[in-house]
C-alpha cells in the first residue's frame, strides 16, 4: 500500500470539499519544513511531514520498534534520493514515501503504514481511507500489533 | 558434561610483580581445562602494578592508576593472590614453601618471580633519614612525603640522585616535579652509560641541564653526612674532594636480584647473583622455575620488563606441555622522562664485528642519533636516539633486518623523512612489553573485527604497558583499516566527507550559519540525516549565540534538543532544572516538589546532584517550565550535548576537612559553562580536599582543592569504560584554573570527533595529555587567545533556552499535541503506581487492564 502501488486520480475540488475521504488537517504553513507534526485521523495518530520542497508525507505516528507514539519527532533527511525519517527512539530509518524500513539497527525490519496526502489551496488533506481500497487502517492495526 | 573437574596441580608463584602477573595471565588465558590452580605470594600489600610507570605516581598519586591488566584475573576462582605475605623458605624435598606467618603450602611447580630490590651502595651514611631508594610505590610515596615536609620550611629543597642511569634520571625528574632542586651524580663517564654511547650521553646531559637538573659525571660519592642540627641527611662528600649540601638523596645505583630464597634452598646462583636457569626457565630443580629479574639467563640478570614477560610466556607454555624457549633478550629501552626523548635498542655500542655507525648530531637542537648497521650498511643492528626518538618505535622492530632505502634518511630531523612502520613484516615485534607482532595487530583488524585503536589495544594488549610503541601501532592500524576498506575515513555520513572536527573548522572559517548553506558548500548534496543534522546544530550552537530553536536550526535538532527535555521509553519526557553545584534552597526544593505534584511526575535524584522529573507529555512542557522559570529555575541542559553538572562536595564552608570553597567554585564553573554545546556531554566535579568526596576524577574535568589552590584533572569518565582523570596542572589560583578549563574545554569542543567524550579524545588527540598541556598551558599552537575569546563570547551570550522559548509564541507552537485537534491530549500513555509514584505500565499490565493512572492527564489544574 504505497502511492506507487496504488496510484490515485487527482481528487477533484468537490471531493476535497466533502471531507468524506480527504480530511483537511492543517494549512501547509502550519507545518515547519523538515519537521513532523501529529494529526488525529479518525482517532488514529498520523505523523505528517513537510519536506524542503513543500511536498507532504504521512506515516504512522506509532514507532513499531518502541511501541511509543513518536515518529513525528524524528529527524527528516535523505538517503540518496529517498526522503527519510529516523525514529527518535532507537534510530531506525524509514522511507517517508513508502514507509519501508531502510535501517533496522540490528532488528527485524518492520515497515510503517503510510497515508496519501494532498495539498490544495494551501491546505493539507490526508486520505482517511489510507489510500485506494482503504487498506491503511488494517495495516496500521497489524503494525501496532507487531509492536 | 560437567566442567568443574577439580584442578589436579598447584602452581605457587613467589613474588607479585609485573612478570608474575603476566605469568598468571598467560597461563589462565590458555589453560582452558583448568589443569592448574595458582597461588601468588606478593610481599607488597597490593596487587601487581605497573612498576615501569612508577614515576607517573608523582602526578597521579593514585595507586590504581598503575594497575596492570584486567583486574578480573584476581577474581578467577583458580587464582589466589595473597598480598603482604613474603615466603620465608623452600623445602625442595617436600615440595613445600613456608610463608612469613609460618603457614606451609604444597606445590607441584614453584616459580620464583621475586624480582630485584634497589641496590644500596656501601657508602657510609646510606641509611640516614632522607636517603631513599626508588623501586616501589611505598618508596615513591615516602620520598614525596619527605620532600613535601621539607618544603614547608619555605626554603628550596636541595636534592641529589646518586646514579645517572634510566632510573636515576627518572628520579631526578620526579624531584623536579616536587619543586626540589636536583643534581645527578654519575660515577661513569656519561649519563645512561649502559644504554647509550658517549656522544649520546653528552647530548643527553645538555637536555637534562636544560630542564634545570645539574649533572656531575665521573664522580664517586665517598660519604653521605648527616646535618649536625637535624641528624638528617645534610651533605655529600665526593672522592675528588667536592661537596654538595643536600636535604634529600635518592640512591639509583642499580638493582640486585632477590635470590636469597634460592640461595638458602641451595639452588645455583650466578656470579653477580640471580637464580641460574636454562632457556626453558628451569632451575637445577625440575620443579622450580625462575622468571624476570631474579632469573640469571644466558649468564645475566636483565632488569627490563620485556624479557621478563618473554620468560613468563615460556613458563606458561611449558606448564601446559609446550616446548617454548627464551628467544633472547630485547634490551631496547626508552627513558620515560617528560620532555627528554632518549631511546636505544639492539647493539647500541656497535659491538658486532665490522659494525658501522651512522651518526647525526645537532648540538644546537640537542639531538644525537646513531644507527648501527652491519658491515654492508644494510642490516640494522641497533641505534641510539637522544633529543628526538620519533624514529625509535618504527626502527626497533626492524632490528636484524635489511633496511629499505637510504639508512641515513631515518636520522634526518623529525618530519623530514617518512618514519618506517606501515610496511613492517608480519613477524616484526612491535610491542616488546607484551610481545605483539605487526601480524597480530593486523589480524586484530582482519580476523577479530577491530575498527579503531582502542579496540586493537584491548584485543592485542599492544601499547598497553609502557606505551612507547603506540605511534607505530596507530600507524599499522590505520594502514590496515584503509586496506581492508573499513571505515577509516572520518566522514560523518553520506552527506559529508568531513569529520566533525573538520566541519567545525570549516564553519568557523566560512562563517556559514545555516544548514542549507553548509551542506551546499561542504556537503555532497541531499538534505542531511539524523547523524549530520544534530552535529551541525551542535557546531552552530558552539560557535554562535542563536537559540536552539532559531529558524532552520530547529529542524536539525534531535527530539531532546528540539523540545528541551529528555525522551523516555514511552515517548514522555523528563525535566531537569539546573541546580548549580548541587546547592538548592528549601524554597527551590518546595517549588520543584510542587511542580512534580501538580503534573503527577515521578521524581528521582540524579547522579549529578539534581532532580529529574519523569512522565511529562510534550504538550505539558511549556506549562511545567512556566512554573519552574517563575520559581527562578533555568534549563539544566540534561537533554543537550553540553555541560551537564558541576558536582561538588560541601567544602570548607562546612566540612571540618575542607581546605577550599568547593561549592562556590562549582557554582561559578557551572554558571560559566552552562549551555556550552560540545561534541558530547561534559561533566565537571569539584572536591574541597584530597578526600575527593565529589568524585571529581571521574569527570571530564575534575578540580581538587589543595592548601595552595586547585589541582585540575582532565579526561575522566564513568560509564561503560571508567577512567580516572589525569593531572593537567597543580596549585592554580582560581583565575588560572578557570582560564585553563576554558581552554581545555574549547580545545576539546573544536577538535573532538562526533559523540567523543574527553577520555577517548585524550587518547587520540595529538600528543595525549602532554600535547594538551602544551596547547592549553604553554600555548604551543598559538591559539589560546582565540580559545579564550571563544569562551568569553559563550559566557557573554548565554541565555536560558527555556525562558527564551516561553517568551516566543512561534517557538511554543511545536509543543502542541495534534495539529488538527490542539485541545485533545495524547491518550497513548499508561502508568501504574509503584512505591507511591507513577511508572510506565508494561505491555502485560496494559493488556490486563491493571493500569491505575491513565497518563498524566489526571493532574489537578486550577
Image (cartoon, rainbow, N blue to C red):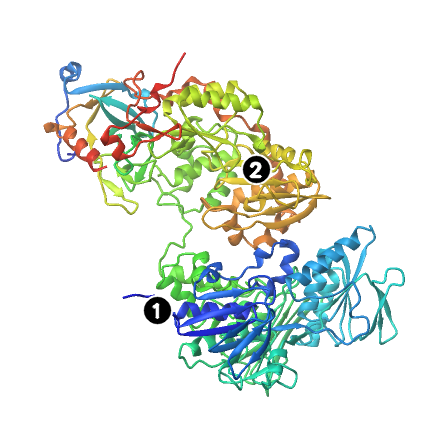
Q: Secondary structure at mark 1?
A: loop
Instruction: Give the label, 2 or 1, closer to the camera.
Output: 1
Chain letter behind tag 1: B
Tell me if B154 is positioned left or right of B748 in this view.
right
The residue where tag 2 is placed is B647
Q: Is residue B610 visible?
A: yes
Q: Is residue B616 above or below residue B105?
A: above
Residue that lies at the very extreme toward the left in this rendered image = A133
Picture quadrant where residue B376 is located: bottom right
Tag 2–tag 1 contact (CB < 8 Å): no
Tell me if B5 is positioned left or right of B74 in this view.
left
Q: Is residue B368 above or below residue B704?
A: below
Q: Is residue B804 visible?
A: no
Chain letter behind tag 2: B
Q: Secondary structure at mark 2?
A: strand
Q: Residues within 10 Å of mark 2 (few under 14, many from 20)?
A: many
Seen from the viewer's position, the closer of residues B559 and B752 is B559
Q: Position of residue A107 (x, y in %)?
A: 27, 45
Tell me if A95 is positioned left or right of B518 in this view.
left
Q: Position of residue B596 (x, y in %)?
A: 44, 23
Picture quadrant where residue B655 is located: top right
Q: Position of residue B258 (x, y in %)?
A: 63, 76
Tell me if B753 is positioned left or right of A127 in this view.
right
Residue that lies at the very extreme toward the right in this rendered image = B228
Q: Residue at x 42, y 72 (%)?
A: B36
The residue where tag 1 is placed is B5
Q: Position of residue B241 (x, y in %)?
A: 88, 74
Labels 2 and 1: the sequence-earlier one: 1
What is the number of callouts on the image?
2
Q: Quadrant of the N terminus of chain B?
A: bottom left
Q: Residue at x 46, y 78 (%)?
A: B108
Amino acid at each position: 500500500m504505497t502511492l506507487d502501488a496504488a496510484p490515485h486520480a487527482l481528487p477533484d475540488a468537490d471531493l476535497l470539499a466533502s471531507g468524506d475521504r480527504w480530511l483537511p488537517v492543517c494549512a501547509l504553513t502550519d507545518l515547519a519544513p523538515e519537521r513532523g507534526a501529529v494529526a488525529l485521523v479518525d482517532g488514529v495518530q498520523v505523523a505528517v511531514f513537510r519536506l524542503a520542497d513543500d511536498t507532504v508525507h504521512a506515516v504512522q505516528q506509532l514507532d513499531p520498534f518502541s511501541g511509543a507514539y513518536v515518529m513525528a519527532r524524528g529527524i527528516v533527511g535523505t538517503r540518496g534520493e529517498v526522503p527519510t525519517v529516523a525514529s527518535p527512539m532507537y534510530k531506525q530509518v524509514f522511507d517517508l514515501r513508502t514507509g519501508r524500513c531502510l535501517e533496522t539497527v540490528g532488528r527485524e525490519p518492520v515497515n510503517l503504514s503510510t497515508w496519501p496526502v494532498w495539498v490544495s489551496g494551501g491546505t493539507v488533506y490526508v486520505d482517511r481511507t489510507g489510500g485506494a481500497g482503504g487498506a491503511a487502517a488494517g495495516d496500521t492495526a497489524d503494525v501496532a500489533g507487531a509492536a | 558434561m560437567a566442567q568443574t573437574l577439580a584442578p589436579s596441580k598447584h602452581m605457587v608463584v613467589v613474588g607479585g610483580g609485573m612478570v608474575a602477573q603476566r605469568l598468571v595471565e598467560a597461563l589462565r588465558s590458555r589453560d582452558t581445562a583448568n589443569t592448574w590452580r595458582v597461588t601468588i605470594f606478593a610481599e607488597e600489600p597490593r596487587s601487581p602494578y605497573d612498576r615501569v610507570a612508577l614515576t607517573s605516581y608523582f602526578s597521579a598519586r593514585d595507586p590504581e592508576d598503575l594497575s596492570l591488566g584486567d583486574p578480573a584475573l584476581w577474581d578467577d576462582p583458580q587464582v589466589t593472590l595473597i598480598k603482604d605475605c613474603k615466603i620465608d623458605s623452600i623445602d625442595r624435598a617436600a615440595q613445600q614453601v613456608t610463608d612469613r606467618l609460618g603457614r606451609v603450602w604444597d606445590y607441584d611447580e614453584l616459580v620464583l618471580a621475586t624480582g630485584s630490590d634497589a641496590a644500596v651502595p656501601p657508602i657510609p651514611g646510606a641509611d640516614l633519614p632522607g636517603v631513599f631508594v626508588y623501586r616501589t610505590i611505598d618508596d615513591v610515596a615516602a620520598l614525596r612525603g619527605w620532600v613535601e615536609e621539607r618544603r614547608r620550611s619555605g626554603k628550596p629543597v636541595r636534592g641529589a640522585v646518586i646514579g645517572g642511569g634510566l632510573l636515576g634520571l627518572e628520579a631526578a625528574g620526579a624531584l623536579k616535579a616536587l619543586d626540589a632542586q636536583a643534581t645527578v651524580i654519575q660515577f661513569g663517564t656519561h649519563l645512561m652509560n649502559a644504554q647509550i654511547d658517549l656522544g649520546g650521553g653528552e647530548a643527553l646531559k645538555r637536555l637534562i641541564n636544560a630542564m634545570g637538573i645539574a649533572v656531575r659525571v665521573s664522580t664517586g660519592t665517598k660519604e653521605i653526612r648527616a646535618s649536625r642540627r637535624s641528624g638528617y641527611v645534610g651533605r655529600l662528600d665526593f672522592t675528588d674532594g667536592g661537596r654538595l649540601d643536600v636535604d634529600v638523596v635518592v640512591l639509583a645505583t642499580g638493582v640486585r636480584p632477590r635470590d636469597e630464597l634460592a640461595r638458602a634452598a641451595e639452588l645455583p646462583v650466578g656470579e653477580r647473583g640471580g637464580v641460574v636457569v636454562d632457556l626453558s626457565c628451569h632451575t637445577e630443580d625440575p620443579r622450580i622455575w625462575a622468571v624476570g629479574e631474579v632469573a640469571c639467563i644466558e649468564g645475566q640478570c636483565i632488569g627490563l620488563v620485556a624479557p621478563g614477560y618473554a620468560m613468563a610466556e615460556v613458563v606458561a607454555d611449558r606448564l601446559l606441555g609446550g616446548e617454548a624457549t627464551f628467544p633472547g633478550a630485547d634490551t631496547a629501552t626508552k627513558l620515560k622522562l617528560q620532555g627528554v626523548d632518549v631511546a636505544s635498542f639492539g647493539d647500541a655500542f656497535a659491538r658486532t664485528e665490522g659494525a658501522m655507525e651512522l651518526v647525526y648530531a645537532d648540538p644546537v637542537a640537542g639531538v644525537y642519533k646513531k644507527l648501527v648497521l652491519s658491515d654492508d650498511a644494510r642490516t640494522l643492528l641497533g641505534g641510539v636516539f637522544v633529543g628526538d626518538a620519533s624514529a625509535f618505535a618504527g626502527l626497533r622492530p626492524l632490528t636484524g633486518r635489511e633496511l629499505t632505502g637510504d639508512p641515513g634518511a631515518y636520522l634526518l630531523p623529525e618530519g623530514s623523512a617518512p618514519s618506517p612502520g606501515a610496511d613492517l613484516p608480519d613477524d616484526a615485534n612491535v610491542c616488546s612489553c607484551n610481545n605483539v607482532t605487526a601480524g597480530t595487530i593486523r589480524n586484530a583488524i582482519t580476523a577479530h573485527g577491530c575498527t579503531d585503536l582502542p579496540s586493537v589495544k584491548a584485543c592485542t594488549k599492544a601499547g598497553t604497558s609502557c606505551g612507547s610503541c603506540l605511534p607505530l601501532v596507530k600507524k599499522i592500524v590505520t594502514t590496515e583499516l584503509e586496506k581492508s576498506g573499513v571505515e577509516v575515513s572520518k566522514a560523518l555520513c553520506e552527506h559529508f566527507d568531513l569529520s566533525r572536527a573538520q566541519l567545525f573548522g570549516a564553519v568557523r572559517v566560512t562563517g556559514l550559519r545555516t544548514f542549507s548553506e553548509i551542506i551546499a558548500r561542504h556537503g555532497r548534496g541531499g538534505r542531511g540525516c539524523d547523524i549530520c543534522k544534530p552535529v551541525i546544530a551542535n557546531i552552530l550552537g558552539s560557535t554562535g549565540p542563536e537559540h536552539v530553536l532559531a529558524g532552520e536550526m530547529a529542524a536539525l535538532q534531535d527530539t531532546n534538543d528540539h523540545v528541551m527535555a529528555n525522551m523516555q521509553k514511552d515517548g514522555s519526557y523528563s525535566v531537569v532544572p539546573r541546580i548549580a553545584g548541587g546547592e538548592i534552597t528549601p524554597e527551590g526544593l518546595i517549588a520543584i516538589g510542587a511542580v512534580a505534584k501538580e503534573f503527577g511526575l515521578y521524581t528521582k535524584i540524579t547522579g549529578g546532584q539534581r532532580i529529574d522529573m519523569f512522565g511529562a507529555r510534550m504538550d505539558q512542557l511549556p506549562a511545567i517550565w512556566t512554573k519552574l522559570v517563575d520559581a527562578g529555575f533555568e534549563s539544566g541542559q540534561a537533554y543537550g550535548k553540553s555541560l551537564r553538572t558541576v558536582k561538588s562536595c560541601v567544602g570548607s564552608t562546612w566540612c571540618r576537612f575542607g581546605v577550599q570553597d568547593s561549592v562556590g567554585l562549582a557554582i561559578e564553573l557551572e554558571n560559566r559553562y552552562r549551555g556550552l554545546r560540545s561534541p558530547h556531554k561534559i561533566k565537571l566535579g569539584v572536591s574541597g580536599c584530597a578526600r575527593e568526596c565529589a568524585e571529581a576524577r571521574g569527570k571530564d574535568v575534575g578540580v581538587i582543592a589543595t592548601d595552595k589552590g586547585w589541582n585540575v584533572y582532565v579526561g575522566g569518565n564513568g560509564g561503560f569504560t571508567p577512567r580516572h582523570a589525569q593531572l593537567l596542572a597543580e596549585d592554580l589560583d582560581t583565575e588560572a584554573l578557570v582560564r585553563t578549563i576554558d581552554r581545555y574545554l574549547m580545545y576539546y569542543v573544536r577538535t573532538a570527533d562526533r559523540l567523543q567524550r574527553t577520555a577517548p579524545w585524550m587518547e587520540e588527540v595529538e600528543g595525549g595529555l602532554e600535547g594538551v598541556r602544551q596547547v592549553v598551558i604553554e600555548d604551543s599552537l598559538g591559539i589560546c587567545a582565540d580559545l579564550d575569546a571563544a569562551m568569553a563570547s559563550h559566557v557573554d551570550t548565554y541565555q536560558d533556552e527555556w525562558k527564551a522559548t516561553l517568551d516566543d509564541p512561534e517557538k511554543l507552537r511545536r509543543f502542541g499535541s495534534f495539529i488538527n485537534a490542539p485541545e485533545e491530549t495524547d491518550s497513548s500513555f499508561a502508568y501504574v503506581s509503584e512505591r507511591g509514584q507513577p511508572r510506565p505500565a508494561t505491555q502485560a499490565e496494559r493488556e490486563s487492564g491493571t493500569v491505575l493512572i491513565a497518563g498524566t492527564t489526571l493532574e489537578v489544574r486550577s
